[in-house]
Image: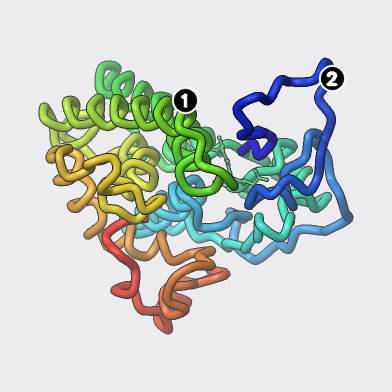
Amino acid sequence: MNDQHDATPDYQPPTVWTWAQPNGGQFAAINRPIAGATHEQVLPIGRHPLQLYSQATPNGVKVTVMLEELLALGHRGAEYDAWLIRIRDGAQFGSGFVAANPNSKIPALIDHSGPQPVRIFESGAILLHLAEKFGAFLPTEPAPRAECLSWLFWQMGSAPYLGGGFGHFYAYAPTKIEYAIDRYAMEVKRQLDVLDRRLALSPYLAGDDYTIADIAVWPWYGALVKGVLYGAAEFLQVQSYTHVQRWAGEIAERPAVRRGRMVNRVVGDPASQLHERHEASDFDTRTQDKIGAAG
Ligand SMILES: N[C@@H](CCC(=O)N[C@@H](CS)C(=O)NCC(=O)O)C(=O)O
């Protein structure tokens, strides 16, 4: 996210960029041009081997859906504690979180199941770590495995155009800049067409089976076509991507997806928000039907 742009038509960049704050952007309070911790904050550790530090943004939801899918398959080793990192409050800049992810972005996972704790950051790396650890949602045959990893990495490379590009300028920027919105709307529609053509050929992105590629792509592009991301459904004419719509609707109905979306959630109906998750029974007091079709 970058709130630095001046929308005035005669703006010329100065010789040296300087950090002007506040700048009116929605994320001005947390955006910084430097890395590292801003304050001391030890991360809590629960009793399960897997400790997740996250918030239910699309990147966070990928991991909680994956963990709930693993548990639904019967992998008891996937039991986890999910701790809420409130990114609008700057919790990603606490010293403990920065030790888990030097990039200061959710999600971050610490796997305590080996002799030494292993930290994993970047949601794609976390999905791959979990898929390999449990031998699930990642095909073993070379061709479908390559297809799965290709779509997983496609998501990691493409979503910043959707979130940091289109979503930022369409929904969050303090002024509407036609050039920026045009540029990113074009790219996002192209990406939706890429997905639509792929999903016309097979039920899931890697072929016949649901994989970490679908788990990674769904919280972004599934939410977008179901109209719950950036309020841009009509603007982008998302109904026309019929194969993506079919795929997104089917995945939204999976019980593990419905559970995973509630974990570390801080928006929407309070009954749909499970701020921290430590046991399967934590879901009992929440209402899964209170979340929309995706997102
Ligand atoms: N490529 C990273 C992106 C993570 C990311 O952008 N996380 C956002 C929330 S969706 C965040 O933590 N933002 C806080 C910040 O930028 O300070 C991943 O997939 O894990």
**Does residue 187 appear left or right of residue 208 in this picture?**
right
Q: Amino acid at mark 1?
A: Gly
Element marked by disc 1: helix
State whether residue 176 is above or below residue 286.
Answer: above
Quarter of the image with the C terminus is bottom left
Q: Is mark 2 within 8 Å of ligand 1?
A: no
Ligand 1 found in image quarter: top right
The residue carrying mark 2 is 16
Q: Residue at x 42, y 84 (%)?
A: 285
Q: Amino acid at mark 2?
A: Val
Quarter of the image with the N terminus is top right
* Res 157 label: 1
Q: Nearer the viewer, residue 27 or 74?
A: 27
Q: Residue at x 57, y 36 (%)?
A: 122
Query: Could you classify mark 2 by the number of other residues whose Cα lies within 10 Å: few (under 14), some (14-19), or many (20 or more)?
Result: few
Q: Nearer the viewer, mark 1 or mark 2?
A: 2
State whether residue 221 is above or below residue 290.
Answer: above
